[in-house]
Image (spheres, rainbow, N blue to C red):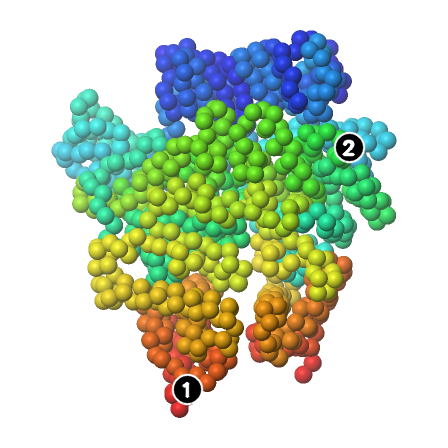
């Protein structure tokens, strides 16, 4: 970002903390960017002439006579078709060795879509993973996170989902990615030959944490360009939102704000909602779908980050290791897609929702049988069949490594029903039993 | 002379302003920045410095930007045309805004000033009137919309002139009143500050009847009174929104105001998409014709979130003053409390529990107290029933918003994760939930009349069966199926019978979704009759099988039209099952 001639320059800092500096600079505007000794900073507070600047990369080595230049505008991203296939850092600068992108500069973190202009999401996004398509169907315009412990392969699953999804653009917002994960994404995208529809904004663990705060806004500004201006179907991947929230708490702490639950800032809900609510189905066909990752601490969803996320997003996909089948599965009990009924049976086969409910209910019966077994009670014949079904169901449908069409998923479920249960035990509507029952 | 000022400080959406004249608490002012004017509300004054919360993003605002004060608090416009409208938290009509994105500083009028309404006269020249008295009425769709003496008028007035019957716009003069300050003109619309309760009524007695929602777990087990208050706390994914939408669709009220406060935008889209199609079961009209939506979704400016619930309540009070029954649904009040917390934090106030402001409890109870049934000056009755949802952090009900609301609201509908996980919807816990109205002698008397003599005792009995069933289930889980006497299994299954047939209800089934009170009475009588019998079973599996059969038949009854042939066939089937058992 070049310094323009008329920008005012100051050289006397009044105070320095770990993340902010303050100085007397009359006329600075709220949210405006500045360069402090060459580092990018943003106005976060003004009081009389005293301006507080948050320096994204930290204040190490900043001197009281550092040169401060105000740039006169909030952070922007230059948008155009040539964003496609590129990798950028949190400031929107290329990190792939290519040239800077030319285009219209748009302020990031812009206004919200008028709720009255939104349309109800109604297009299924198939992923090939039955734990999603069959049980928690994804709809374009939806926002949904993976809830996963750090040891789960959430980034791999997400990359898979993205590459299989039928969308025009995929935008990756990586926050606090390990360098290995960053290279993994890059490798996967290049291998799939899909690079021309992918745009990445990446902050790795090697970069300062506060920079992460810019990533979602950068990614979503690019997404809005393609969805609103070009009427494209855009899928945005945000990983890992827990690290984003951690960066929020660092900043609020440095600014002496009173923390609320789990030492998170009191505005956490609004901060997260501002990002997730960018997911939208637009009237002219464009859409933004957000799939995020929220890492959990030992499966605890009552922590402020997953808790607030759950209130904002339209469901969650819960990853866990299943000891019985030895696979990583999408937990059918703790996962939910709030929009699934908008497409199930409408864009998918008529028996979809009944098959889904029956298979999950029988899986729940298996859990009860398991509890009985653990408590040392005798199992009935039905219990035994449930247990065997559960293992099969987890392996063939719940595991994240399956890749099936929806019809194949439904047929597989009917196979399992016929293998382990009587028609009555499934509790499915008679008309569907007559039509789809496989076997006698 | 209006007061003006200059910005002297900015933190997020809190600005401090150096003022050149008098300012009042809660006064509205406009911050001019880059050619647009941003609305803000004064929330603290210290000497000649005022702190104001800006209802929009403060990006680009500079110290030295000018501020104009309006001498007014945040007001809404009240008049014909409010029904079927969609407003943001500050009563801007979002349907008339241009562009896909909300534009900062774009404010649209709440009512269409050019639309003509057919006015008929109610009062007569020479009548002595006070604020809230009816002068005439217009037809707002199907609803007789009263044109009243503005609520801000103090003292007694004499009607000097009334417009003849005819078509008028909201700003046309329809009356002249002679009062303490001489002759004043009255139009069909008026303004009122949202944070002040409208008190144009004679008295506010205790509620005397219940408001039907068609939801069994509410109407039968813990009914809410007309003019009553209730709240629904629940962790995410427990069906809070589905339950609220069910109440909005079926609630026995003339006017429904839905305040979507800090929740998902797609949920509002669902209302926009579905309500114009759906039919009001009580009147056969389109639901949208009785509904006003106030939406300040979670990504819209935080400060306006607080305003949105007050805006909604004021509109409710306005319709109540016409002698109508109004239902206000706010989803969710926790988001409003969080907005208060963010602001209190920026003001550097000393925090209370979980960093919420210390006066949270009094703010909440003050708001809930604006609901209620009233007797108007002309003897007519009107009511505002208020149901709010609460989103407790981590699903833990021991948090400040839930606790404060519990003190203020009279009905408590606890949604339970465990029930939701088992897909037992609505997931209202029948034991933890309560309705204080069941203790009101007026309500007990009303239910004796309207439903059946001794109804409240019956409900208590059903609750007791559930309690006993829960204890039995605990014992069975500890000791095993074989380790407990047969009577435990019987008790457990009786509670399951009540659970499956009465408590659970399919909100997505056309028939089961709405259960009128007469039908609720029939089913509860039937189920209690089955529970009161004693059974003899050889083993627990037989017991379970038998009850499962009964449950299945009764559920089919729930899915069939009341007293239809199909319904009666299932009734006979049940009789036959019981007979066979006897043999």
x and y, in percent, of residue B204 in the image = 23, 43
Query: Measured along the vertical axis of the image, is residue A270 above or below residue A135?
Result: above
Inter-mark Cα distance, 2 to 1: 74 Å
* Pointer 2 residue: A206
Which residue is labeled 1 in the image? B581
Task: In the displayed orientation, state which residue is furthest to the bottom.
Answer: B583
Could you tell whether B199 is left or right of A140 in the image? left
Where is residue A7? Give x, y as percent.
Answer: 69, 12
Of the 4 image quadrants, the one containing the C terminus of chain B is bottom left
Tell me, yes or no, if residue B288 can be seen here: no
Query: Residue B324, position in %: x, y?
Result: 28, 47
Q: Which secondary structure lies at badge 2?
A: loop
Look at the numbered discs 2 and 1 and tell me whether their residues touch, using CB distance below 8 Å.
no
Quadrant hosting residue A207: top right
> What's the residue at 46%, 43% (across, down)?
B399
Crowding at mark 2 (Cα within 10 Å: few <14, some 14-19, many 20+): few
Residue at image point 39% right, 67% down:
B468
Residue B474 lies left or right of residue B151; in this view the side is right
Where residue B328 appears, x then y in whole percent?
37, 46
Residue B317's quadrant in the figure?
A: top left
């Amino acid at each position: 970002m070049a310094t323009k001639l008329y920008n005012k320059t100051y050289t006397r800092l009044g105070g320095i903390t770990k993340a902010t500096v303050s100085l007397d600079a009359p006329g600075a505007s709220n949210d405006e960017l500045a360069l402090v000794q060459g580092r990018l900073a943003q106005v976060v507070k003004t009081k009389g002439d005293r301006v507080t600047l948050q320096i994204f990369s930290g204040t190490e080595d900043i001197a009281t006579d550092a040169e401060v230049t105000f740039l006169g505008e909030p952070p922007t991203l230059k948008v155009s078709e040539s964003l496609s296939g590129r990798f950028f850092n949190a400031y929107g600068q290329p990190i792939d060795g290519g040239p800077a992108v030319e285009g219209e500069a748009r302020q990031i973190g812009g206004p919200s879509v008028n709720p009255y202009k939104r349309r109800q999401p109604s297009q299924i996004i198939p992923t090939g993973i039955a734990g999603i398509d069959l049980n928690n169907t994804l709809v374009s315009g939806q926002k949904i996170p993976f809830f996963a412990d750090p040891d789960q392969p959430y980034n791999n699953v997400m990359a898979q989902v993205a590459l299989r999804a039928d969308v025009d653009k995929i935008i990756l917002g990586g926050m606090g990615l390990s360098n290995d994960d960053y290279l993994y994404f890059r490798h996967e995208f290049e291998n799939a030959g899909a690079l021309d529809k992918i745009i990445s904004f990446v902050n790795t663990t090697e970069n300062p944490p506060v920079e992460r705060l810019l990533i979602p806004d950068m990614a979503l500004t690019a997404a809005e360009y393609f969805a609103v201006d070009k009427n494209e179907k855009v899928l945005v991947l945000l990983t890992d939102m827990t690290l984003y929230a951690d960066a929020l708490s660092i900043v609020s702490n440095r600014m002496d704000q009173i923390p609320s639950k789990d030492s998170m800032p009191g505005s956490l809900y609004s901060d997260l909602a501002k990002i997730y609510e960018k997911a939208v189905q637009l009237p002219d066909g464009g859409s933004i779908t957000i799939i995020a990752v929220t890492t959990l601490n030992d499966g605890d969803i009552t922590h402020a980050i997953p808790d607030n996320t759950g209130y904002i997003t339209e469901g969650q996909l819960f990853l866990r290791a299943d000891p019985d089948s030895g696979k990583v599965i999408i937990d059918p009990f703790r996962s939910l897609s709030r929009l699934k009924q908008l497409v199930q049976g409408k864009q998918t086969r008529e028996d979809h929702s009944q098959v889904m409910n029956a298979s999950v209910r029988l899986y729940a019966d298996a859990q009860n049988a398991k509890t009985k077994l653990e408590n040392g009670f005798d199992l009935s014949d039905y219990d035994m069949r449930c247990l065997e079904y559960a293992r099969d169901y987890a392996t063939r449908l719940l595991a994240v490594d399956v890749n099936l069409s929806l019809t194949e998923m439904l047929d597989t479920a009917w196979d399992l029903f016929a293998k382990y249960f009587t028609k009555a035990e499934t509790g499915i509507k008679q008309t569907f039993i007559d039509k789809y029952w496989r076997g006698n | 002379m209006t007061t003006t000022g200059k910005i002297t400080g900015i933190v997020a959406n809190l600005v401090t302003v150096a003022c050149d004249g008098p300012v009042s608490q809660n006064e509205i002012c406009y911050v001019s920045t880059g050619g647009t004017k941003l609305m803000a509300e004064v929330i603290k004054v210290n000497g000649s410095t005022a702190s104001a919360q800006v209802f929009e993003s403060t990006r680009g605002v500079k110290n030295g930007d000018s501020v104009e004060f309006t001498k007014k608090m945040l007001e809404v416009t009240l008049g014909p045309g409010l029904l079927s409208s969609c407003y943001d938290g500050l009563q801007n009509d979002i349907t008339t805004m241009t562009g896909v994105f909300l534009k900062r500083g774009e404010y649209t009028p709440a009512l269409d000033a050019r639309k003509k309404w057919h006015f008929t006269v109610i009062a007569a020249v020479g009548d002595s009137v006070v604020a809230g008295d009816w002068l005439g009425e217009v037809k707002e769709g199907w609803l007789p919309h009263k044109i009243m003496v503005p609520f801000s008028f103090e003292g007694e007035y004499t009607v000097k002139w009334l417009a003849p019957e005819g078509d008028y716009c909201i700003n046309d003069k329809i009356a002249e009143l002679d009062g303490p300050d001489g002759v004043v003109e009255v139009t069909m619309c008026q303004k009122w500050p949202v944070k002040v309760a409208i008190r144009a009524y004679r008295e506010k007695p205790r509620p005397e009847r219940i408001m039907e929602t068609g939801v069994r777990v509410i109407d039968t087990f813990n009914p809410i009174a007309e003019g009553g208050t209730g709240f629904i706390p629940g962790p995410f994914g427990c069906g809070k929104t589905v339950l609220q939408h069910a109440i909005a669709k079926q609630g026995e009220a003339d006017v429904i105001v839905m305040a979507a406060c800090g929740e998902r935008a797609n949920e509002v889209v669902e209302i926009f998409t579905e309500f114009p199609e759906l039919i009001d079961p009580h009147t056969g009209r389109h639901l949208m014709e009785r509904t006003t939506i106030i939406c300040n979704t979670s990504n819209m400016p935080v400060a306006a979130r607080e305003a949105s619930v007050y805006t909604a309540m004021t509109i409710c009070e306005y319709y109540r003053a016409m002698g109508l029954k109004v239902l206000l649904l706010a989803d969710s009040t926790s988001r409003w409390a969080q907005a208060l917390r963010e602001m209190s934090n920026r003001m550097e106030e000393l925090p209370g529990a979980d960093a919420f402001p210390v006066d949270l409890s009094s703010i909440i109870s003050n708001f809930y107290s604006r609901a209620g049934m009233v007797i108007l000056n002309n003897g007519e009755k009107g009511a505002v029933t208020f149901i709010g949802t609460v989103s407790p952090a981590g699903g833990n009900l021991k948090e400040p918003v839930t606790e404060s609301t519990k003190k203020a609201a009279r009905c408590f509908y606890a949604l339970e994760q465990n029930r939701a996980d088992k897909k037992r919807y609505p997931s209202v816990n029948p034991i933890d939930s309560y309705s204080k109205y069941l203790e009101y002698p007026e309500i007990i008397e009303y239910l004796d009349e309207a439903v059946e003599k001794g109804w409240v005792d019956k409900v208590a009995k059903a609750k007791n069966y559930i309690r006993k069933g829960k204890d039995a289930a605990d014992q069975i889980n500890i000791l095993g199926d074989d380790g407990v006497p047969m009577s435990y299994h019987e008790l457990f299954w009786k509670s399951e019978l009540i659970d499956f047939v009465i408590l659970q209800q399919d909100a997505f089934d056309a028939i089961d979704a709405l259960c009128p009170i007469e039908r609720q009475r029939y089913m509860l009588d039937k189920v209690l009759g089955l529970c009161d019998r004693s059974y003899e079973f050889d083993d627990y599996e037989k017991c379970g099988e038998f009850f499962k059969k009964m449950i299945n038949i009764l559920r089919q009854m729930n899915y069939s039209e009341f007293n239809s042939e199909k319904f009666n066939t299932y009734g006979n089937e049940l009789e036959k099952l019981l007979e066979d058992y006897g043999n």
